[in-house]
Image (spheres, rainbow, N blue to C red):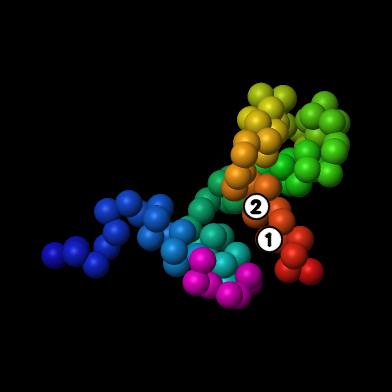
Amino acid sequence: MYEDIDPTPLNELAHALAQAEDPEMIKGFLESLLTENEVSDISSRWTLVRLIDRGMSQRTISRELGLSLCKITRGSRELKKDDSPFAHMIRLYQESF
């Protein structure tokens, strides 16, 4: 009955987003899919990773964004991984301008 639905929904969602070329449409989709709190959480995580990538200290990020050092440390650890998806997405974003 649901043969056309990927059994791993995150894969299906990732493929759909990878096909989208309109950032405003993707933003609207995410705002429709996620609660306001989830949008806020994702936005702050993206911001903290961007600030870490720029060299801002974790303590300064914590103070500026009101985030726990634990959450920031996790982002920093993810950013430092070989083939980091965070680092790759930052580069893709930077190349788009």
What's the magenta region? Answer: 18-24
Residue 28, percent from left and from top: 57, 67
Verify whether residue 73 appears in magenta: no
Residue 27 versus residue 34 in the image, above or below: below
Residue 64 versus residue 4 in the image, above or below: above
Secondary structure at badge 2 equals: helix
What residue occupies the far bottom of the structure in this picture? 22
Residue under numbered circle 2: 88
What residue is drawn where x is 72% and y is 42%? 49
**Residue 64 vs residue 2, the one in the foreground:** 2
What residue is drawn where x is 73% and y is 68%? 96
Residue 41 visible: no
| Quadrant occupied by the C terminus | bottom right
Snapshot quadrant of residue 92: bottom right
Residue 13 versus residue 63 in the image, above or below: below
Side of 70 relative to 57 (left or right):
left
Residue under numbered circle 1: 92
